[in-house]
Image: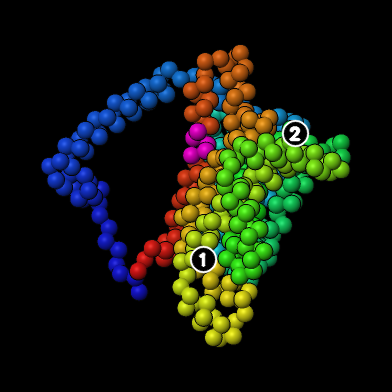
Amino acid sequence: MKPPAHTKGPARWMKDNLFNTWYNVLLSCLAFICLFFIFKTLLTWAFTEAKWGVIPANLQLFAVGTYPREQIWRVWSVIYILCVFVGLSAGIWGGLVLRFAVMFGGIWFIGAFLPFGFSTRGWFLGAVAIIAASFFLGRGRTGLRPWILGGWLLSFPLIMIVLRGFGESGVHTSNWGGLLLTLILAVVGIVVSFPLGVFLALCRQSNLPAIRWVSTAYIEMVRGVPLITILFMGNILIPIFMPGLDINQVLRMELAITFFSAAYMAENVRGGLQGIPRGQHEAAQAIGLNYVQTMLFIVLPQALRSVIPAIVGQFIALFKDTSLVAIIGLIDLLGVARSVIANRDWFGLQAEVYLFAAIIYFVFSYSMSYGSQEIETALGVGEH
């Protein structure tokens, strides 16, 4: 059993951490004074001087870029697919997944009542209703867990098909943009680079020299150049070396980001593998497990558990690094921000536009960080 938690009220916490000595009292007072003037200036500008009308006027552009308005139902179809899986997962697993579902549904509920959400209120409330219905449908049905996990794996190609469509009636990837493109690049990079990074880490730990040398050369070569170089190489060299394949620019950037992130992921995982005592391998061999079983059931679970902070940190860095595709010519969230401030109707509003983009990046990054902390707490990482 875990020891009882000792909670402190705000006053007791401030006394123990901020005002416990005379010099801490002095430093805390100086910090509060500085924060007061900083936030006073920022809030005064935000509520009296800033012209926030640029955000609702370009909200759809921030969300989906130049995605055709007559095809916007495809984006909402994708959102509804995600709502179904989020609601079912919350009902089956509960806990952290349930809290995420509540937050996910709360975003759509709040969006329905914002001043610029009147025209799409039905779409927003529909998402909330789907999450709630899916939650009650999956509540307590633990036998559906394998099916839901398989559904999550199959949902990504389904989402890509819905967004792209077929033939002339579809939407070409050159029209994808805004937050939609940022999330697609980040999700593909995270989902694909993680198993690839684990594979590269195992190859670098291999006893076979050829496999170890090849993986080491790849990891060190990729880690030795900046991401923007990999993006330019993917954008220019892939069409040259594969002239017979029609690989669009979005797919080229996904490949470049994935292969770049996999090299860093491999080093994070390798650090966890090296932290596993040799006795774990010997004990697994003593009970008759082969190499694959030892890695899959004994070593990797412990290694990944110990490097959760580093892995999530890599995911957060990958999400923010997707902003570099704006240099290549893709109109992601940062690219939309640049195009908005280039419009003569919104000259001089760089602060408002970039602050809005920064808030979006912060919300997603902090959400991943918070999820990482909850997973660490659930697994007992750092506890003795």
Q: Secondary structure at mark 1?
A: helix
Q: Residue at x 38, y 25 (%)?
A: 42
Residue 273, numbered circle: 1
Q: Position of residue 384 (x, y in %)?
A: 35, 69
- Kind of residue at disc 2: Ser
Work out whether residue 88 can be spotted: no
Which label sits in the foreground, 1 or 2?
1
In this image, 116 relative to 46: left or right? right
Q: Residues within 10 Å of mark 1 (few under 14, many from 20)?
A: many
Q: Residue at x 62, y 54 (%)?
A: 217
Q: Residues within 10 Å of mark 2 (few under 14, many from 20)?
A: some
In the picture, the quarter occupied by the N terminus is bottom left
User: What are the residue bounds of the magenta stretch?
Assistant: 358-362
Q: Secondary structure at mark 2?
A: helix
Pick whichever, 273 or 22, lies toward us.
273
- The structure's colour scheme is rainbow
Pick whichever, 317 or 112, lies toward us.
317
Disc on the earlier residue, 1 or 2: 2
Q: Position of residue 265 (x, y in %)?
A: 56, 54
Decide: is 271 above or below 161: below
In this image, 363 relative to 40: left or right? right
Residue 174, numbered circle: 2
- Kind of residue at disc 1: Leu
